[in-house]
Image: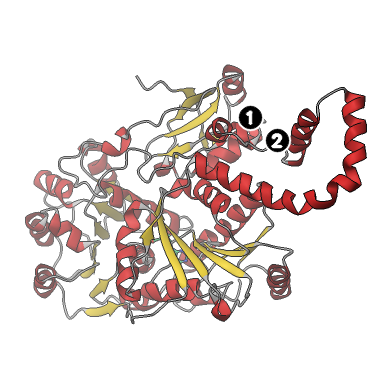
Amino acid sequence: MTQETGGFAAFNLNPNILAAVIATGYEEPSAIQQQSIPIIMAGQDMIGQAQTGTGKTAAFALPILHCIDPAKREPQALILAPTRELALQVATAFETYAKQMPGVTVVAVYGGAPMGPQLKAIRNGAQIVVATPGRLCDHLRRDEKVLSTVNHLVLDEADEMLKLGFMDDLEVIFKALPATRQTVLFSATLPQSIRAIAERHLRDPQHVKIQTKTQTVTAIEQAHLLVHADQKTSAVLSLLEVEDFDALIMFVRTKQATLDLASALEAKGYKAAALNGDIAQNQRERVIDSLKDGRLDIVVATDVAARGLDVPRITHVFNVDMPYDPESYVHRIGRTGRAGREGRALLLVTPRERRMLQVIERVTGQKVAEVRLPDAQAVLDARIKKLTNSLSPLVADAESTHGDLLDRLTADIGCTPRALAAALLRKATNAQALTLAAIEKERPLVPNNAPRGDRPERTGDRPDRGDRERRAPVPLAEGRARCRTALGARDGIAAKNLLGAILNEGGLAREAIGRIQVRDSFSLVELPEDGLEKLLTKLKDTRVAGKQLKLRRYRED
Ligand code: AMP
């Protein structure tokens, strides 16, 4: 066990839960976890003021899992979430943390899916039920005893539930639960309506709030970019094209993410390395020294590993994953703008994290301006500028050293100096795309903040129209075909799993694979049209996350 996991070890959680947490790559508890886990483990009622991005799901999921009895095959914990999307997310988090607890099952109960299998899963002894209030009430109408064994209740995003009009449903659910249960309420805000619920239904609750002091960050220019989680690597690569940086630090949340992102950057030719709590101290020092003296330009780090890092060369901080709280944001971006220099900080924000962005703006008292992904023209301009900057110092004396050779080569080859210079440029730029059309073709992202039929952040589970599945398709690049697999986020699939499987088993180059979009119940992958049938046959038996990939050509119409 590394030194950093000591943070989680100190809670004395069931060792199987601790092992699963370590396996996810978390290095230390976030502030809300630090405070909430002991209270919930002790069986006390609690009100937690925290929003998405603070690690609140694990803050209740870990202690709840610790408290349940896996041997009892009956519902013991009920988590209420405002939307189907959040319910699924919470259920997946529970499954991750319960991976090493044999016999523990989790069921997600939400509108838009048939009721029969949900009820069956509950009756079959799922210990954890994650539900949206509307659908749960439908179940209660069929079987009012279905929740009679629940002794832990969590209301997640309680303010959102009230906004969506679930007040009456909540009252019905409270009545259906044993009065002796433990109740935990999480909410980003605590309006009077939430306080009233707490007063009526919680017993002597402990209050947990992450204190946020106002902080100032003046010398640093800040910006944010809205992006879907599975587009982060592509977004980072696009931003790097146009940002004029010297050295750069990128922050992510897990050890695995440091490794994945650092290798994606290295593959694109950047001098990048990962820095995380698993890396031995002397190796960490080597990485930092390399960043100082220019052998490395980019370090991808977790918060823990970057503690105390002071490298004056750092001109940019990329917050690839959202920090847990504004203090940690301020701390991270303080890695740049050192010694009176100017610094620039970029924050990637997924649609669900917009609220966290507002909190950061409030606490720092500064607007974090929105930027968009650079379009093909901006990428082209940046590439040409780099080329100009690298060549212009050479022209002064290159003619005297290589002029005669040029004459000889043009004569030997029988071409014009212009043709020869063009050939040399192609070679010198490694055939990098240097026309608008070529750049548009290679870029996996559409330079827009709402590239994929972005939708309102939340939809209640009633009426549930499955709009997540119906986002507008993005136009395909020429020569690409879109393929579909029935594996999606709910199967534990991430874009990198699909990419890895297709690269390994299909024998393709990374550039041959276009956008990968992972949805709850399916994923889309863009592949070369040329040779597609052969490729699909090659991938026929490929498995991802233990399941058959079964990739098929997908037609929108
Ligand atoms: P939440 O605020 O619960 O929506 O969590 C936000 C994200 O943080 C999720 O992707 C979690 O997997 C991740 N996360 C939660 N706790 C930790 C931790 N202690 N270390 C690293 N990542 C975490």
Q: Is residue 70 visible?
A: no
- Disc 1 crowd rating (10 Å Cα; few below 14, some 14-19, many 20+) is some
Which residue of the protein is positioned furthest toward the left in this rendering? 168
In which quadrant of this rendering is ligand 1 seen? bottom left
Residue under label 1:
506
Front disc: 2 or 1: 2
Residue under label 2:
431
- The amino acid type of the residue labelled 2 equals Ala
Question: In front: 286, or 432?
Answer: 432
For the residue labelled by badge 1, is the local secondary structure a helix, a strand or a loop?
A: helix
Q: Earlier in the sequence, mark 2 or mark 1?
A: 2
Residue 140 horizontal side relative to residue 304, left or right: left
Question: In front: 267, or 208?
Answer: 267
Residue 133 horizontal side relative to residue 156, left or right: left
The residue under the point 40% across, 69% down is 324
In the figure, residue 248 lies in which quadrant?
bottom right
Report if the CB atoms under discs 2 and 1 are less than 8 Å apart: no
Question: Does 235 appear above or below 35?
Answer: above
- The amino acid type of the residue labelled 1 equals Gly
Residue 170 horizontal side relative to residue 372, left or right: left
